[in-house]
Image (tube, helix red, strand yellow):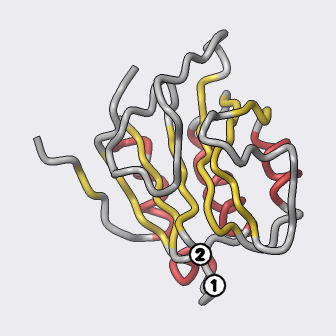
Amino acid sequence: MAKANSLLRLNGQQINGNNLSCTSEQLHKIIDTLITFVTDCVWYSADIDTFSVSLPELNKTGVPSYIGNSIKLVELSVKVPQFLSGVFLAVPKQVSSVSWSRAYRTEDLPFEEIDQALYEIRAFDTSYFEIFSNNSSLLQPLVTTFGGNLEHQSK
């Protein structure tokens, strides 16, 4: 288990030039960029709330639920015009049994425990995405593609 120590915030303008933030298209662009560098992940969701659509496959509680690979996440989320809140966790495929140490909420404090996840993506109140990792080099492709500044947890 590991605590996140790096954070990147991205809004719609940075991701695709849109004044709206937290759209499914923007989530797909983030995922596409990440999976170019980390291919063997499965995704989990928690605390999902969406604008005008309800998808039972995307978990509304704080307990992460299994979605599947990146393609499955994109297929599910394409139905969502905009996320009001949500947490998406990418876990290496070879982790056979994920043990979650806490509930995951969009409004959790930064730099929380991310368990076995490589990434925690939070869709924050239609304002921006927060992408956390315990390895700042895993966030560098997003910085290169979309800009933004990495924040690091002060020790």
Q: Of all residues shown, which one is farthest toward the left? A: 155
Give the quadrant of the C terminus: top left
- Point 77% across, 73% down: residue: 51
| Position of 69 relative to 84 (above/below) | above
Mark 2 nearby-residue class (10 Å; few <14, some 14–19, many ≥20): some
Residue type, numbered disc 2: Thr
Q: Which residue is painted at 55% across and 71% down in the image? A: 125
The kind of residue tagged 1 is: Leu
Quadrant holding the N terminus: top left
**Residue drawn where x is 65% and y is 69% of the image:** 84
Nearest the camera: 137 or 107? 107
**Residue 37, horizontal then vertical, whole percent:** 57, 40
Depth check, front residue: 99 or 142: 99
Please name whichever residue, 38 or 5, is drawn nearer the observer in this view of the structure: 5
Q: Position of residue 35 (x, y in %)?
A: 64, 43
- Outermost residue on the front side: it is 61
For marks 2 and 1, give the CA distance: 7 Å
Nearer-N-terminus badge (2/1)? 1
Disc number at residue 126?
A: 2
Q: Is residue 12 left or right of residue 56?
A: left
Task: Determine whether, in the image, residue 83 is placed left or right of residue 89.
Answer: right
Figure quadrant of residue 40: top right
Numbered circles on residues, count? 2
Query: Do residues under tags 2 and 1 come within 8 Å of each other at their CB atoms?
Result: yes
Please tell me the numbered disc located at residue 20. Answer: 1
Does residue 109 appear to the left or right of 46 in the view shown?
left
**Which residue is located at x 64 percent, y 34 percent?**
64
